[in-house]
Amino acid sequence: MPTVNPETKKSGKCIACGACVAGCISGALTIVPWDDVTAVAQEII
Ligand code: SF4
């Protein structure tokens, strides 16, 4: 469940719901599993 900061009226954490991916008309966004992100990061280090 995302939380919204009552002062800024903005969500502070992505919960990977995919709504921004579904609404991106250019197809520039994608959801990447966190394990894939950490695997690539470990290859770089
Ligand atoms: S996936 Fe996109 S729409 Fe969903 S919480 Fe994260 S940034 Fe927001």
Image (spheres, helix red, strand yellow):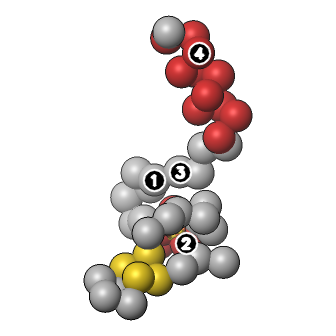
Q: How many marks?
A: 4
**Which residue carries the number 4 mark?**
42
Q: Secondary structure at mark 3?
A: loop
Q: Which is more toward the observer, 25 or 14?
A: 14
Name the residue nearer the viewer: 19 or 42. 42
Q: Amino acid at mark 4?
A: Gln
* Relative image position of residue 2 (x, y in whole percent): 58, 76
Which numbered disc flags the more N-terminal residue, 3 or 2?
2
Tell me the SS state at disc 1: loop
Residue underneath mark 3 = 30
The amino acid on which the numbered mark 2 sits, given as a three-letter code, is: Ala
Q: Which mark is residue 19?
A: 2
Specify the quadrant of the image occupied by residue 39. Answer: top right
Is disc 3 in contact with disc 1, using a CB cutoff of under 8 Å? yes
Mark 2 surroundings within 10 Å by alpha-carbon count, few (fewer than 14), some (14 through 19), many (20 or more): few
**What is the C-alpha distance between the residues marked 4 and 1?**
23 Å
Residue 31, x across and y down, in percent:
58, 51
The answer to whether residue 30 is above or below residue 14 is above
Mark 4 or mark 1: whose residue is earlier in sequence = 1
Q: Is mark 2 within 8 Å of ligand 1?
A: yes
- The percent position of residue 18, horizontal first and vertical second, equals 59, 65
Is 31 drawn above or below residue 17 in the view shown?
above
Q: What residue sits right under mark 1 in the picture? A: 29
Q: Quadrant of the N terminus?
A: bottom right
